[in-house]
Image: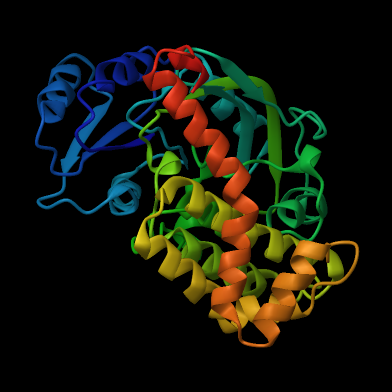
Amino acid sequence: MIVPIYNAEKYLSDTLKSLTAQTLDTLEIILVDDNSTDSSPIICKKFADVDKRIRIFTNTTQMGVSASRNLGLRHARGAYFAFVDSDDIVHEEMYMRLFKTAVAADADIVISNLRVVHDGGSRQVVTYNRHPKNVQLGRHYLMTNVIAPLVGIKIDPSLFVGNSACDKLFRASNARNGGITFDEGRLRFEDRLFVVEFLATAKSVTFVDEAFYSYIRRPKSLQTRYNPGELDAVISNQLRYRELFEKDFDFDSPMAVQYRVSAITDVIFSTLSHSRGHSEANKRTTEVLCNPHVVEWYSKLQPPGATPFYRVVRRCINSNHYTLAHLLFQAKFLPVRLKLLARRLAVRTGMMPQSVA
């Protein structure tokens, strides 16, 4: 397993305890320190001195999580590999179970359920119950029921296998032979792109009906704050999906177009919600609405996906009124923003418990 680490001293010990407790003796634990400035390197060495399954590699300058994962991939020696974030927890049986399942089913990728632990302790288990468990599912099933929902050809939430690379076990030879690595130039949606590109090389998949991996959702994580690269990443991902699977799927179908427009819209709303009026976010939103691909997607939107809001936005975009389209997004998001502001004010004045905010 590969663990990218940067200034994770607050949570790292708990993560490494869960990894060193793994019952798979042949497990290789690769820790990649991204030039941390806190005590993370000391914590890594302390665990490595006790558990010989641990190997430590260090970036001489801060390179980012994708570069750290790629470094780990270059040094990985096992037949399969997996990823763990430095502030998450895994069940002690996770890699024993996933590895045994992969070998028994001769699977290129094994996918387990995911447990999301929110700030405050509430838990949510993301399950993939629609998929058969513990059996090899071939390329046709993979294309129809795994890849198609991921790239927006089939919109069925019950088949969606999630964006994370951490609830999966990957066959190493697929990645090596296919040249599959993380895109080191992006800060968002890099997991999803890696998973989709890996699936393009896969011939079989197996599902395990256990939530072994606990993803700890931190209030100040990258997913909960403004990210200037988010809008560009969602566009480039959509273009890459088409490049990979254009011969297999119709990316101009009404459902596929609606998916791409919805993806852009969701990220615009996410940007507006996390930016708190950041001027760069407003500028980037307008620039994205000017993007030729986004203009094309909106122009192809058909009913029932073309709701009154989308129709007005499409008309603005088609007539080159991009600033007006951006203002429409701002106006539509205003009630949500006011509600968030009211909750923050209530917390600060003691009128609402902190956990509600």
Q: Position of residue 253 (x, y in %)?
A: 84, 72
As drawn, which residue projects farthest toward the right? 304
Q: Position of residue 107 (x, y in %)?
A: 65, 41
Is residue 199 visible from the viewing direction of this image? no
Is residue 262 visible from the viewing direction of this image? yes
What kind of colouring is applied to the model shown? rainbow
Drawn side of residue 190 relative to residue 149, left or right = left
Does residue 351 sit above or below 214 in this rendering?
A: above
As drawn, which residue projects farthest toward the bottom? 319
Quarter-wise, where is residue 202 in the image? Answer: bottom right
Which residue occupies the foreground of this view, 268 or 113?
A: 268
Q: Position of residue 39 (x, y in %)?
A: 10, 26
How many discs mark residues in the rendered view? Answer: 0
Q: Position of residue 278 (x, y in %)?
A: 36, 56
Going 30% across and 45% down the picture, which residue do you hit? 72
Quarter-wise, where is residue 300 in the image? Answer: bottom right
Which residue occupies the foreground of this view, 289 or 38?
A: 289
Does residue 351 sit above or below 140 in this rendering?
A: above
Does residue 39 sit above or below 192 in this rendering?
A: above
Going 75% across and 76% down the picture, which residue do you hit? 247
Which residue occupies the foreground of this view, 307 or 303?
A: 307
Drawn side of residue 240 relative to residue 39, left or right = right
Which residue occupies the foreground of this view, 279 or 115?
A: 279
Going 75% across and 80% down the picture, which residue do you hit? 299
Which quadrant: the N terminus? top left
